[in-house]
Image (spheres, rainbow, N blue to C red):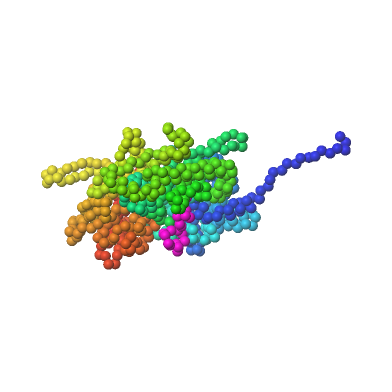
Amino acid sequence: MEGSSEKVLEMYQPEVNQAAEMYEITSNFGNPLELLREAISNAYDEGATKLHISCYLNDDNKLIVKLVDNGEGMSKDSLIKNFWGLGYTDKVKGSADTIGEKSHGTLIYLRSEKIIVETFHDTGAFRSEADNPLQALEEGELFNFSVEELSPTSKKRGTEITLVGFNQNVADNFKHDVMRDYIYWFTKLGSFQNELKGYKAKDFTVHLKGLDYDDSNQITLLEENYEECKFGHVFPPTTRDYKELLLDKGKNFFKYYVRKWTGTNKVQIIDRDSKVKEVEYQYVIYYEGDTIKRNYNPALKPTGRTEQRTLYRVADRYGIYLAKDFIPVEKVNNWLPRIGDGSFTHTTALHGFINCQEIPLTSDRSSMASTQPKLADELRKSIFNLIKEIGKELKDNKDGVFYMKNNYNALVKEYQDDGSSKPSIDVPTPVNSGEELTGQKGKENNPPPIKTPNRPISPVLPVNSVPPVNPPITSIDREKEYYEQRVNRIKGKRYFEVEGESIVSLTSNNPYRASYKRKVYEPDNEAETYGVFMKLYTLFPDLFPFSVLDYSSHKGIDLLVSYDNVKNPTLSDRIFYLELKYVYRGRNFNHAFHSLAYIVCWDIDRTLRPNSRVTNNVGEEALFTMEKTGKSVNYYLKQPDNPIQIQILPLKRIIEEKLGLVFKR
């Protein structure tokens, strides 16, 4: 119609300042160690079995971080878009097989003065470099990077990344012990998924060398000059015999108490289509006494020590963490109810993780702030109830730590009066597993028992090397279950094989010959270390310059030994102590050095440095030393006023170095 006007609806798309967006995300990474999390996740997703991480200061005092993996490598297109770009990824969104999906993680590499990437892929080999990328982004410009094709290497696969001048050359966080602690708590290497039934991790290890790593005292057998860090978060062995714990440790038993719960729960939410949706989460929760924590976690700040900045307190680290991809994201202690005996809350006695794959994370993966409020609220309520049930079990059950504390005198009297048998341990089921037990319906005051651990146990050998006594079996089903647990445990352990022939002269004319082939499994505790030691002592007597005379774990030091009268004829009539340890740590050693000649252990704590002073619980000091002879390395504790050099014999290193045996699984 003449004179009329029609409105024109104009459509637009939002414009994005790419440089500003990249700079913002790069700046959001708060902890420079998040670099390790992203490097480990990327290597794991690319099918690597090994990732080498090393740090050093070059001649210009610039912090260099090198990341070398043996994964699939990157194609040229993937290098250009996925590595250097923003928001591009080949990962499948929501997949349980890969970590992350935003393609933001590698932006933390941009906090370097120079980045060098060399990658070897089926489609070719490429080198790429960028100089001062963060400076360009600060100035509002996208940075430039080069890509050149390298001569292909037929067999080599993987990626090597070198970061020059990372983190403005501030290197405090890149001390070896700090890095190791971080990767076991906040990266995929420290995943807790192996604690859950039905979850199995890939074959993956990290080989680590931090700034102050002194490899002169390390025998890193698989990879020279690096510490090998195996997959899996570190938890202590669970308590199996609560009666023995109570009688052995007395009123301090709760400091050594360990219990474990695992399972799967579900919560319900209303999705965007107004339909009910079930969201699943998995949990692994330990209750750990304070002494146990300090025994297995060398990074914990010793009580009363304030000068060690790189260590932390129990309250700083422990509690319950929410996780995604089995990587902890955020501690949620504020979600938890009070549990305990009434005197104080025991939240930091908990060491646990809740994994939920439905949680969307912030761009730097440091928070669940992006999670839907309804999902967060349902998770909070479910986790609250889960911990409440755990607290109730610990208070009401006879083997619960709070019950044992509140009834200590009565239990001690009962156990002392009935010394012939041990209290049987209930076989609990997961809390809030979503399955109702027969006979439990409507019994709110009688919650279902909680699942006991399937992880390795620490049996205590009685006097005179009698094998461990197991708790009485009260049913065929329980015996079968216990049998299956032990079989599954053995199947998952590493072992080495020994094959040979033995000849024993029974009389001058009657030699006994026998061929043998033995599997020897890697130990998980002191008792199993003793088993490995006795096998090696029998098969390879030349490795041990002494004869075993007596064994007792009841009181005092474990073994009496005499010097071998062939190798040490002047000392053949002298008898000394030999102490067994699973891992010798150089602290909390509960024996005097007097008359002690040997310490046999599975391994030596790699935080123990040569020429460092070690102490025992009575205040004696000794110097931890290492002596190299060719390729052989010997370890000693020395005291200026003690003529005996206490030799430490780490069985793992003897097996791999001197015998050249390789562990299998």
| Image location (x, y in percent) of residue 411 | 34, 47
Q: Is residue 624 left or right of residue 568?
A: right
Question: For this rendering, which residue is in front, 558 or 555?
Answer: 555
Residue at the image point whose x is 32% and y is 36% from the top: 474
Q: Is residue 313 magenta?
A: yes
Q: Residue furthest top?
A: 438
| Image location (x, y in percent) of residue 318 | 46, 52
Residues drawn in magenta:
301-319
| Image location (x, y in percent) of residue 171 | 50, 60
Quadrant of the snapshot with the N terminus:
top right
Question: For this rendering, which residue is in front, 107 or 564?
Answer: 564
The number of callouts visible is 0
Question: For this rendering, which residue is in front, 434 or 446?
Answer: 446
Q: Is residue 497 left or right of residue 380?
A: left
| Image location (x, y in percent) of residue 466 | 24, 46
Quadrant of the snapshot with the C terminus:
top left
Residue at the image point whose x is 53% and y is 44% from the top: 380
Question: For this rendering, which residue is in front, 50 or 253?
Answer: 253
Residue at the image point whose x is 39% and y is 43% from the top: 397
Q: Residue furthest bottom?
A: 641
Image vertical order of residue 237 relative to residue 636, above or below: above
Residue at the image point whose x is 46% and y is 42% from the top: 389
Instruction: Look at the magenta stretch and give its main secondary structure.
Output: loop
| Residue 399 seen in the current view | yes
| Residue 52 seen in the current view | no
Name the image quarter holding residue 306: bottom left
Q: Is residue 63 magenta?
A: no
